[in-house]
Amino acid sequence: MSSHREAPEISKDPVADSSDLYAFVTPDRPDSVTLIANYVPLQLPSGGPNFFEFGDDVRYEIHIDNDGDGHPDVTYRFEFTTEITNPNSFLYNTGPIDSLDSKNWNRRQFYRLTRVADGREHVLANRLPCPPCNVGPLSTPKYNDLVGQATFRLSTGEKVFAGQRADGFFVDLGAIFDLGTLRPFQQLHVAGKKIFKEAGDPVNALDRMNVHSIAVQVPLNRVRRRSNRYGQADRASIIGVWTTASRQQVRILGDRVAKDSATGPWTQVSRLGNPLFNEVIVPMAQKDLWNTLPPSEDKRFARFVEQPELAALLPALYPDVFPNLDRLNKSKKARADLAAILLTGIPSGLIDGFTNNTGDVQADMLRLNTAIRPSARPNALGVLGGDLAGFPNGRRVTDDVVTISLRAIAGLTVPLVDKNFKPDAAASAVTPGLSAADVTAPFLRNFPFLGTPYDGFNNPSASGS
C-alpha cells in the first residue's frame, strides 16, 4: 500500500496514519496547486453506529518546502473538534441529513485551519464544518450536496475541504506481499520464453474502502519562493511536499495520567512524502523512527534507496529474467537514479525540458515543478510515459505509482545516470496489472478530485460477502 499501516506503531493508530499524499498543478486552475492528504485508512463503509472521523487529539499538517532544505516554509494545519447534538441518543443521525446544520445529525466535526509561514501562524478559518460520513440513501440522500456545502473558498485565495472520500489508491496487496507476485495484463516473453506464470486476475484490495481527506488548493504565489535564494532560476518554481500527523505527549504521575497531560509538546507520529517510501524502502526495524523524523534527516536512509531490497528480490524471484539488474545489484553500485527520483529530485539535463531538483539535501518529499502545466491527456505512467506533469513530478490521483515505482526499481530509470546500462526487457513490463479504472468510485474532474465515499447500505462489505 502507499502508506497504509506501513509501520508497526502507526498501524495501531489509524486516526493518525497518513495513507496517501497527492500534489499537482490544478487542471482546471493552473494558477494553483492542489494538495491532498489521506488519513484513517481501510474504512469499511458499514461503520456505524460509530462512524469514522478525524481525531480531536491529532494535529494534521501539509508541509511545503520551497528552498530545498527539507524543512517546511509553509504549513497548512488542520485541528478538529467534535460536538454531540443529542447526548441521549446512540444514533449518528436521527433522520435524513440534508444540510450541514441539520438537527438530525448528532455527531459533527469542525476544524480550524492555520497557515504557518515565516515563523508566524495565521488562522485562516475557524469552525469550518466537515460533511458527515456517507451513511446511506436514507441518512445522506444528497451526499454530494453536503460535500459542496463543506467546500470553502477563503478570502486569502485557498479552497479547502476536510472529510470522508473514497480511497483512490489501487494496488493488488495479495500479489505484492506474496513475495512480489507480478501480474501483467498480458504474458511477457523474452527470447521466446514465457517469464511470468499465470497468477489469476489482479484484485484492487483497497476498492470500496474509504479514507478521511484534508485537501487544500493554494494559489501558486502562496507556495513558491519569494526570492531565488540560491540564484538558480530553474528551482524557483519547484516545491517539496509532505504530510505529518502529531500527538501531544502525556505526563504520567505515579500510576495515573496527569489531568493536564493534553498540554504537553506535540510529537510527530506519522509522515508521508513519496508513495511507498516507508512501505518498501525503509527496513522494518527503522520504520517507526522514520515516522518521527523530518525529511531533512533522510540522509540516514539513503543507503536503502541506493541499494533497495526489492531490486535484489526481483532476480531471485524471477531467475534469468533480470540478468542486467542482477549484475548491477552484484556490483554494489549505488542507484543514483533512485536517489535522484526520491531524495533530491531529477536534475536538469537528464530528461529534455524537465527538472524537479531541489538541491543537495537528501529528503523524501513529493517534488513538484509548478511551472509544468497540467497535461491535456494525462498518462498514468507520468514521467516514464512521457507526461512531465505526473509522478514523480508530484502525484496525481490517477497516477499508477506502483507500476512506475516497480519499473524504476527494476532498472528502467538507470540509463538516466548511466547511458551504458541496458535495462532488461522485463523492466518495461513489470506491473501489478491495475489502473485507475479498477477504482469503483469515479475520480472527480475538479476539487476535491477523490471520488464519493462508499455508503454502508450499498456496500455492506469490502469483500463482497
Image (cartoon, helix red, strand yellow):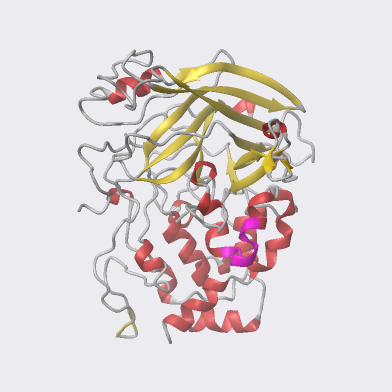
Give the overall secondary structure of the magenta segment.
helix
Taking the image as shown, residue 98 lies to the left or right of residue 54, namely left
Identity of the residue furthest to the front in this view? 255
Tell me residue 178's x, y (percent): 39, 72
Taking the image as shown, residue 390 lies to the left or right of residue 290, namely left
| Residue name at image x 44 percent, y 37 percent | 212
Residue 456 is at least partly visible in this image:
yes
Q: Is residue 289 above or below residue 454?
A: below
- In the image, the segment drawn in magenta is 281-288
| Residue name at image x 76 percent, y 35 percent | 228
Q: Is residue 282 magenta?
A: yes
Q: How many marks?
A: 0
Depth check: give the residue in front, 397 or 101. Answer: 101
Depth check: give the residue in front, 237 or 242. Answer: 242
Depth check: give the residue in front, 448 or 220. Answer: 448
Residue 349 is at least partly visible in this image:
no
Q: Is residue 382 above or below residue 336?
A: above
| Residue name at image x 53 percent, y 47 percent | 13
Taking the image as shown, residue 242 lies to the left or right of residue 190, namely right
Which quarter of the figure has residue 450?
A: top left
Tell me residue 29's x, y (percent): 47, 26
Tell me residue 251's x, y (percent): 72, 40
Taking the image as shown, residue 140 lies to the left or right of residue 339, namely left
Tell me residue 458's x, y (percent): 20, 39
Which quarter of the figure has residue 335?
A: bottom right
Quadrant for the N terminus in the image: bottom left
Identity of the residue furthest to the right in this view? 230
Q: Is residue 139 above or below residue 184?
A: above
| Residue name at image x 71 percent, y 23 percent | 121
Q: Is residue 219 magenta?
A: no
